[in-house]
Structure formats: C-alpha cells, structure tokens
Image: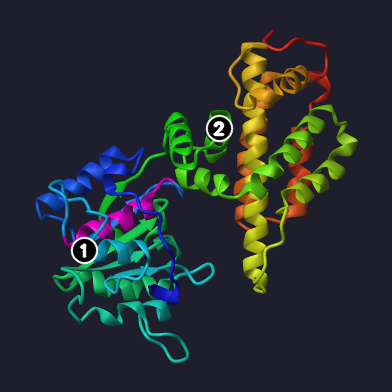
Amino acid sequence: MGGGRRRTIEAMPLKDIFGQAPAVAGLLSAIQRDAVPQALLFVGPDGVGKTATATEFAKARVCRTPTAEGDACGHCVNCARVTAGEHPDVVRIAPDGEFTRIWQLWSRSGHPPGSLETLPFAPVAGPVRIYLIEKAETLNDESANSLLKALEEPPPYVQFVLCAPSPNGVLPTILSRCQSVRFRQVATVEITEALVRLRRLDPHEARVLAAYSEGAPGRAFRLADAPELRAQRDVLLDLAARIANGPRIAAFRLAEDLRNAAKPAKAKKGDDDADAADRTARGDLGRALGVLAAWHSDLLSVSLGGKSAPVVHEDRRAALIQAAARYKPEQLAGNIEQLLKYRRHVARNANAQLATEALMLQLIPRAEARAERGPGR
C-alpha cells in the first residue's frame, strides 16, 4: 500500500459497479482483448465510483481465475488480498494532506520507501503490477514531473490508473500519455435502489440520502454508514425552516447556528493535525450546505408545482408549503445557486464565518417576496 496505508475495500465486481455501464463495458472489453492501455485516467466527479472501479479493475487484472468476461472471480487468493488492501502488486498512492508528494513516489531521506521504487522489478504474485494514484489532481509540480518519466516508458508488466475529477487538474503531458475513461453522475433512482439493496435502508431514507449525494454513490454510502450524520439532518432541516421565517437582522445568528449544526455529533478522535481538522470541519460544513440545497430544491418544486409537487423531504411537506409561500421562485433558484457556490468557496478555504454570514443574508426571504401568496401560484 502506497504511503503506508492499508484498508479493507468493499468487494463489488466490475459487473456490479452501478451507474457506470459504458466505463465498465470498455474496461472489460479491453481486458478480454488483452488491449489494456498501460496508463488509464479515470475522470469524473468525486464519489461517482472511480476509485471503486479502479480497485475492481486491479482485481480483475491480477485474478487467478477470471470470468469469461474478464472480470475478477472474487474468491481466489489474489482477489482476497486486493479486497483486504494487502496485495503486493496493487499499490495505492493517496495524497499526503493536500498534495501527492515526490517522496511518496520516489525514496527520499527521512521518509518511507517511495511506491515507484518497485518499477524495475517484476510483479511477485500476478501478471501485472498496478499503481493506483487516487487523486491525480493533487500531484504537485515536482511529483507530477517525476511521474511523467515513469509514464513515458513503463515496463511491460506495469499498469497505471490515475483518478481525477477533471482532465483540467492533470498536467497536460500526463494527460497525453493516458487513455481517459469518463465516469458520470448516477441517477438518483439508481442510488436509491443500491442503498435499499446494499444497506437495507428504508426506501424513504434511501431517497433522501440519494438526493443529498448529488449523483455520487460514494457520498451516499458514506452518509448511510454514519448514523450520527443522518441524525444531524433533523437539526439542519429545523434550521432551514427557521431561515424562511427569519428577518434579515437574524442572519448572523442563523449563520452561527448553521456552523454549530454542521459540527459532527461525535468528536473525531486521534486527529491532532490542525490542517486535517480544518479539512474535516470544512467537509462537515459542505455537507450541511448540501442539505440546505436539497431543502431549497424542494421549496422551488412546491413553489412552482403546488402543494402536491414531488419533494425529497416528504415527511416535512407541511413545513415546505409554509416556507415556500414566503419566497418567489426566482429567489429560490438563486438560493440553490448561492448554496452550491458557497460550498465551493468553503472547500477552497474561504473564511467559514464570513461565508456563512454572507450566505444567510442571501437565503432569508426578501421583503418584496413576503406578500401573501400561495405556493404554485
């Protein structure tokens, strides 16, 4: 495992990766034809299944008894070791903080051995050695340029798989040496069905989490596996209803309540790194803004479609109807855009207090919209 990390991966053969049929079909076809490019770049939004697919692709490549379609059997010793994160020829390289650094690739004094130091040596347990770079967009200039040298003339037994949200975040010279495989956002109904099937969730709960995931199954499964985060939702939705009834003078208090509501219900232990704690806090606030975005999407649906319009938060329809009456549809559409914009700002290190205060001033109903009006009129 690159960077000294070990993890247990949830097993899901390539054929069972949902929502990414074109990508999976292309990979299986390449495996069957023995025509897999030595460098692949999986491109798509975070959480859509790039890393999960890369893991199962690696498993298929080292499987001792693959299926007729080229997929992994899931049962042989090599499959088991990949699932456990312990296969010597499947090397995962994750960022060290915000960047993937050169010492993670090539040995440097004071650091563990670099993952690419094994390049000259033949694989020990399978036909290929696979280097999976989980977040290629985090390669700094030094590490990206050093990786380029390896991509230009890799040994015949080496396979590179890089994952990134967008080609724009990858050095053009690296991009030119990789075959891109595109991953798309997954339909809400597909994520809902997967949560019901794989996590045994109630269909209503599954629909809510699927809506919050914004087409990213990985995000939905993380929410499903964190009951303390699901418990936060009620607090955030109560706050969302208060925003619709709040005067502008209450914006700063509401912003503070939002920041407090975004904090995890249980303190995270074992993390003394201030930078890591800051990233965690920003992630928590980002998820909270996602909940508010889903709520405002419901408000817009009710505002345009009337009291019986389809909504995600079915159990709060009465509150949605009451709140929607205080907005014009134009402001609700703008609110959704602002929520997504400020979520990006927070992820990019914007001051959380200033950002949430400015956002709250945008979200509170404007005075001219508070005339009595029925939803859908």
Left or right for 166, reference 75: right
Query: Dot 1 corresponds to which residue?
Result: 62
Rendered image quadrant of residue 123: bottom left
Percent across and percent down for residue 141 are 42, 71
What residue is drawn where x is 37% and y is 70%? 144
**Is residue 232 toward the left or the right of residue 183 in the image?**
right
Q: Badge 2, how many Cα within 10 Å: few under 14, some, many 20+? A: few
Relative placement, left or right, of 168 versus 289 is: left
Q: Classify residue 181 as left or right of residue 210.
A: left
> Which image quarter is the C terminus in?
top right
Disc 1 element: helix
Q: CA distance from mark 2 to mark 1?
A: 37 Å
Q: Residue at x 27, y 43 (%)?
A: 15
Residue 17 percent location from the top left of the image: 33, 44
Q: Bounds of the magenta span? A: 48-64
The answer to whether 67 is drawn above or below residue 334 in the figure is: below
Would you name the residue on which mark 2 appears? 202
Label 1 environment density (alpha carbons within 10 Å; few <14, some 14–19, many ≥20) = many
Residue 312 found in image quarter? top right
Q: Amino acid at mark 2?
A: Asp
The mark that comes first in sequence, 2 or 1, is 1
Q: Secondary structure beneath disc 2? A: loop
Query: Residue 102, relative to residue 205: is it above or below?
Result: below
Residue shown at the point (40%, 51%) measured from the top left: 166
In this view of the protein, which residue sits in the foreground, 118 or 376? 118
Residue shown at 78%/30% (left/top)? Answer: 241
Q: Predominant secondary structure in magenta?
A: helix
